[in-house]
Image (cartoon, rainbow, N blue to C red):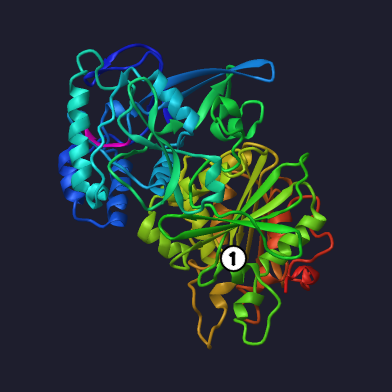
Amino acid sequence: MFKCAMALAFIGGFWAAADAAEISLPTRPADAPKGAAFAKGIANLDSKEREREIRAQVAQGNVPLFWRRFVEIKVTRAFDGRTNTAAYFASPDYLAIGADDDYFLAPVTPETAQAIADSLDCVLPTRRMVEDIYAAAAVKLAPKPIPPSAAMTTVAVFEQHNETVRRQRAELLAEHPLGALVGGHKKDVVLTARLANAPGKVAIYGWHQPGGKPIQPLYLGHASAWVDYSHGARFVQRKLTVNGEATTFEAVLANPKLASLLSDEGPLSEPRYGKVRAAVVTNTFNEQTVTMTFDPGVRAVINSPIAWDAGKPVKLVLYALPNGNTIEQTIGRKLKPGDDWHYDIQHIGAQTRWLREHARDANLVVAYLECAEKSWPAWRRQHDTNGKRIAIMVDALRRHFANHPLKLVLTGHSGGGSFTFGYLNGIENIPSDVERIAFLDSNYAYDATQGHAEKLARWLAGANDRYLCVLAYHDSIALLNGKTFVSEAGGTWGRSHAMQQDLAKHFEFTREADAEWQRFTALGGRVKFLLKENPAKAVLHTRQVEWNGFIHALLAGAEWEGNSYAYFGPRAYEQWIAD
C-alpha cells in the first residue's frame, strides 16, 4: 500500500520529507468535492450516513495530494539493557477530505477510523506514539478550543474549527509547506490497553499546548459513537522497521522486549478497534470465541482452542456461511424439541473438534463469516462487486493472529463460495500463507473470464504445500418437489467440470470414474475434484457437508485423508456435538 521516497522534492506545492512513504489511493477524481463543498454536503446527514460518506470519499481518492505522503518518525528506547530503535511512517496531518487548496479535517468515530486504517494497511497510534509524533512535528499549532455546547458534535462546528486551523496553518506555509508534519491542533483517537475493559468506548488523548503538555489526558468517558470537532484520526503505516529489520505494528506491540518503542502501557494484545468483543468460553470442549464485525453488516465469530501449542502454527479457516444460515446453526448442536432443523445439517463445530483431535499439525481456528443478507452472493452484488472489501476483511482476520506463524484456509458451503471468489477478484495473486482452498458444493461463482483459473494455477504451482479440494454432486438432475432447480452449466456439477477443464490446461490430471463418483486428481493429490454421481436424483447439497464433508475438505491430499472417517459415510464426529 506504500511506496518509499527518499529524496527531497517539491511536489504538488509542498516539500516532501527526505524519508517519506507514499500511500496508495486512486487518483483524486477531477469532479470530487473540495473540503468546504464536502462539509456543506454532509451537514444535514445523520452521523452514520456522514461516516459512510467520509469512507466513500477516501476510497475514491478524494484526499489532498500532500496527505498521501507519510512522514518518517524515528524513536530510540532502552529496555532490559538493550537500546532499540524503530522507524515508522505517520500521516502528515489528521484525516483530510478534499484538495491541497481546500481540505476538511474530518472527525470520525473509532470504527470508521479503523475501517479506513485497514483499507490503507495502517493502524491508529497509541498514546506514546502521539507523544513521539508531536515531538517530531515541524509544525506545532496551539490548540484552539471552542466553548462546549450541544453543537460541538455538528458539522457546523467542525467547519468553524477547521477554518481556525486553516488560518493557523496558512501563517506557516512559507516556512513549512504542505506535507510537513503537523501536530497540536486536535485530540487523537488512540489505542490503549484500557479499551479491553471499556467496550463500546473511544479513547482520546492529546491536543498539546506550546511546551508539550496535552490538554486531554487519556480519556475513555465517551461512547464510541461520540465525535466532536476536537477529534482527529492520525494514521500510521502498519509496517515498520525495528533495529533495521522489517516487522509489523502488531508484532512489536506483542513483544514484551520491544513494546515500549510504541506503547507506554506494555504489550497490547488487541491493538485495534474493529468492534472486537472479548473472548468467552463457549462450552465444555475447551474452546473460546471472539466476535468481530465489519461494515456493512458482517459478523465474524472466531472459535479457537483455549490451550495453544506454542510450537505449532495457527491454521485459520475462514468458513463463509451457506445461504439462509446463521453462525449458530452452522456450528450446530444436539437438537432439542422445537429446535430449527438447520442446527443439525452441517455441524462445523463438531467436525472442527474432530479435526483438533485427529490432525494435530496446527492450532486449528475457525472464523465463521455471516452477512446480514444471509447470502454472500447478494451481499457482494450490493456492497462489493470488485472484492476489495472482502480482501480487507481477510487481512483484518489475518492480522488478528499476527503474532503467530499462520496458515490460511478459504472455504465455505453453498453461497459461501462466493466469498472465496470475491476474495480472488479483490487480489492480484493469492498470498503465500494461503495453504488450502476448498469448495463444499459452493463454486457456483467460478468464472474463468475473471481470472479465477489463472490465479488458482499460479498459486498451486508456487509451492508444494498448497491444496485445492472441490466437492460437488450432480445437482442439475436433482429434483426438488419434482422439478430441477439448477442448470447443467450453472450448478456445482457444471462449474466443477469447467474449473477442472480450465486447470487441466496447466496441470496433468488423472481421472477415475465408477457408478458413484468421478474423481480428478493432479499435483500428486494436492488437487482433488470429488464429484458425486446422482442416479437417484436426490438433493445432496447439505449431505455433502454433514457426512464428514468439512473434515474431508481440510484433509484431502494430506496424510490424514480417510483416516478414522469416510467422506459420505456415517458422521464421525457424533461425540463432539455440543448440547
To which quarter of the image does residue 369 belong?
Answer: bottom right
The image position of residue 129, as x and y in percent, is 47, 28
- What residue is pinned by disc 1? 441
Looking at the image, residue 356 sits to the left or right of residue 463; the answer is right
Q: Identify the residue shown where x is 18% and y is 20%.
A: 171
Q: Nearer the viewer, residue 30 or 124?
A: 124
Most foreground residue, 328 or 514: 328
Residue type, label 1? Asp
| Residue at 41% over, 65% down | 378
Q: Which type of secondary structure does the marked residue at label 1 adopt?
A: loop
In the displayed structure, would residue 74 be above or below residue 130?
above
Q: Which residues are magenta?
A: 95-99
> Who's the residue at 56% across and 24% down the image?
261
Total marks shown come to 1
Mark 1 residue crowding within 10 angstroms, few (<14) / some (14–19) / many (20+): many
Taking 123 as reference, is 16 above or below it?
above
Vertically, is 548 above or below 237?
below
- Tell me which secondary structure the magenta stretch mostly adopts: strand
Quadrant of the image for the N terminus? Answer: top left
From this view, report whether residue 123 is shown above or below residue 443: above
- Horizontal and vertical percent for residue 226? 35, 51
